[in-house]
Image (cartoon, grey):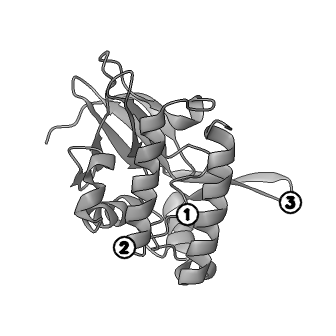
Amino acid sequence: MSISIGEIIGEGNFRTTYAVKDKDLCLKKHKKYVTKIIYGLKIDFRSNFFIFLKFGVSDLNVMEYKAIKKMPAELTPYIPSDIEFIKGEGLVMGRAKDVDGTYSEMMANFGPIHNKAFWEHIERMIKIFEDNNIYPSDILYKGNNLIVKKVSDEEWIPIIIDFKRMNMGYDLFSRFEFGSKKTFYRRLKRFKEAFKPKL
């Protein structure tokens, strides 16, 4: 696949997400450096050094690609299309679009979501995680890793855009099932408090 990078559409601690020109795709690429504040001083470190310390791998895109491929088939409606890892480039994903043709937005950009179908999809997604003993710690974190796809006025669907912590964290606590579960349910509670309208 030929990749022509467009504008920046997202940014994390270790990677930058770019639009792909003339295609409904995005590309996650590693940053070269990560800035850390140590004793009040900003110091730039090579990102692969911190990636290895935090995740135990040298390439987050490879790790995420493998995690996506291991996801249960029932989760497919909540996974981006066109997933592909391209060596030397990064991780490619399809960009979800709303019914009006515009690109779907991150959940973090919304306030409380008053769409019944959306919350039914969230509960279905949570059930799939539980049934498969998957307790991702990042997906529900502040709504930053979910896209809200408006299929119609009546139906909105959550789309997961970050899979790097699918019970695969390198840090000691999240490596154990009880650690993953505890973090998952704590963040699920906060997620609902922030985005689910109170009855």
Instruction: Give the label on residue 26, or none.
Output: none
Quadrant where the image shows the C terminus: top right
**Residue 104 x %, y %:** 40, 28
Q: Amino acid at mark 2?
A: Asn
Which label's residue is closer to the chain start, 3 or 2? 3
Q: For the point 30% across and 20% down, which residue is it?
A: 99
Residue type of the residue flagged with mark 1: Ser
Give amino acid for label 3.
Answer: Tyr
Say whether disc 3 or disc 1 marks the residue closer to the N-terminus. 3
Q: Tell me where residue 69 appears, x and y as whole percent.
A: 25, 64
Q: Secondary structure at mark 1?
A: loop
Q: In this rendering, would 127 be left or right of 34?
A: left
User: Callout 3: few (<14), some (14-19), or many (20+) C-alpha neighbours within 10 Å?
Assistant: few
Mark 2 secondary-structure assignment: loop
Q: Which residue is mark 2?
A: 132
In the rendered image, residue 140, in percent from the top left (x then y), is placed at 55, 52
Q: Is residue 185 above or below residue 157?
A: below
Mark 3, residue position: 39
1 vs 2, front mark: 2
Residue at the spot x=27%, y=65% of the render? Answer: 72
Q: Which residue is mark 1?
A: 137
Image quadrant where residue 110 sits: top right
- Give the Cα separation between the discs numbered 3 and 2: 43 Å
Instruction: State which mark lies toward you, 3 or 1.
Output: 1
**Position of the N terminus by quadrant:** top left
Q: Is residue 84 above or below residue 2?
A: below
Mark 1–mark 2 Cα distance, whole angstroms, equals 15 Å
First along the sequence among labels 1 and 2: 2
